[in-house]
Image: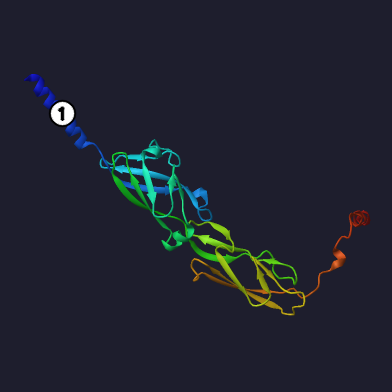
Amino acid sequence: MLKSFLLCVAIGMSLLANAQQAKPVRVIAFYDADAVTELYNTAPLGLQLVYSDSSIQKTTGLLEGTLRWNKLKVSSNNGPVQNGILTFNRNQLVKDDYRIVLTVTTPDNISLQTTLELPTVVGIRFNHYADSIKRDIRFYLNIEGKFSSGKVFPLDTGTVRFATSDGKIIGQDLLLPKSDTIKFVTVEAWYKANERLYLRSVLPVKQAPDNDSLLLKNTDDLFKKKKRRQ
């Protein structure tokens, strides 16, 4: 009888302990801000599990926690997550307003969801390398994106489209013909993912010819000029 009683007590205490064991109730996702997700389509992740007793557990890697990624099942509505690295589709990201939903299943088969928000372009600007355009010489249309992360990065024709009032666009270069006589050219730019982000820039065309006398024809000319100065 005593053994049966003790066995019942032990089973009861075990069940009580399991019932009182803290369970994950919320998950928070972080991404590596140094991974330049503004331009690249991968992002190292970190997950923080919040338990019913207010304790927390962090994943290894980015958050330097103890919870190993192979103990979790992580999926997203935009690309796979493998060993803490998310690979996403940027076109899908734009459609989803730069939000990615992660579903995390814990070792005790509890599924939780969280939303990760990645940086978005909030503005674009021209950053011209020169004050004027020369005829018959390609002029690079340098355009930059201002992101919600506060960072600024150059953009290319993959994300921006251009139009010009004269000459032609070749890739991201503007080329005016040598015979052109215009004095100004207007360049327009749209951010493809959100064409409400629009720019217009009026650039002067250099009218005076270059002074070829200042060009060195060979290295001997350089030494001659040095001797004259001496």
Q: Amino acid at mark 1?
A: Ile
Residue 112 in the image, given as x and y percentages of width and height: 31, 48
Left or right for 56, reference 216: left
Q: Quadrant of residue 57?
A: top left
User: Outermost residue, left direction?
Assistant: 1
Left or right position of 37 against 218: left
Q: Residue at x 89, y 54 (%)?
A: 219
Image position of 7 with respect to 150: above or below: above
Query: Residue 178's spot in the image, x, y percent?
Result: 77, 74
Secondary structure, mark 1, is helix
Q: Could you classify mark 1 by the number of other residues whose Cα lies within 10 Å: few (under 14), some (14-19), or many (20 or more)? A: few
Question: Which residue is identified by label 1?
Answer: 11
Query: In the image as oriented, which residue stretches furthest toward the top?
Result: 2
Vertical order, 20 against 157 (above or below)? above
Give the image location of residue 104, x and y in percent.
Answer: 34, 46
Q: How many marks?
A: 1
Examine the rendered structure and indicate whether residue 223 appears above or below residue 207.
above
Q: Residue at x 15, y 26 (%)?
A: 10
Judge by depth and name the residue closer to the eye, 214 or 47.
47
Q: In the drawing, does residue 229 fall left or right of residue 7? A: right
The residue positioned 38% from the left and 44% from the top of the image is 47
Nearest the viewer among 147 and 112 is 112
Most extreme residue toward the bottom is 181
Q: Position of residue 18 (x, y in %)?
A: 21, 34
| Quadrant where the N terminus is found in the figure | top left
Give the quadrant of residue 159: bottom right
Q: Residue furthest front?
A: 80
Vertical placement of residue 216 versus 84, above or below:
below
